[in-house]
Amino acid sequence: MLQLVYFARVREQLGVDQEALALPAGVERVGQLVDHLVAERGEGWSRVLKAPNLLVAVNQEMVDLQAALKDGDEVAFFPPVTGG
């Protein structure tokens, strides 16, 4: 089971803050997970999760879309942090 967590604007746009998801068959990398979620949930999810500046962390470590996933991982999605 994966624990998916959505933060800030991502949470607001998707309307969900966290969820548990069984690791889908054939999903071994973060990018494949994103593709799976988009295929299952549609265009609104595509706009958010396919944004070029989306940040992803696996088990609280920043990763890219090629990062490997395993059962039990926490995957967090959030917009880039801005400051000034």
Image: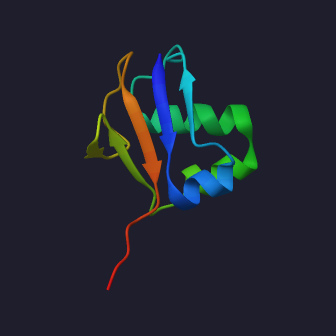
Residue plotted at (46% across, 23% down)? 2
Q: Nearer the viewer, residue 13 or 50?
A: 13
Q: Is residue 77 left or right of residue 50?
A: left
In the shown orientation, is residue 12 left or right of residue 67? right
Q: Residue, x 35% and y 19% (percent of image)?
A: 70
For the view shown, which residue lies furthest in the bottom direction?
84
Q: Of all residues shown, which one is farthest toward the left?
A: 61
Vertical relation: 73 (above or below) 46? above
> Residue at left 41%, top 65%?
80
Q: Height in image: 25 above or below 53?
A: above
Q: Position of residue 27 (x, y in %)?
A: 47, 22
Out of 16 and 66, give the one closest to the viewer: 16
- Quarter of the image with the C terminus in it: bottom left
Where does residue 53 sit, x and y in percent of width and height?
Answer: 44, 63
Image vertical order of residue 42 relative to residue 8, above or below: above
* Quadrant of residue 75 within the rendered picture: top left
Look at the picture and state if 25 lies above or below 33.
above
Residue drawn at (52%, 13%), measured in percent from left and top?
A: 25
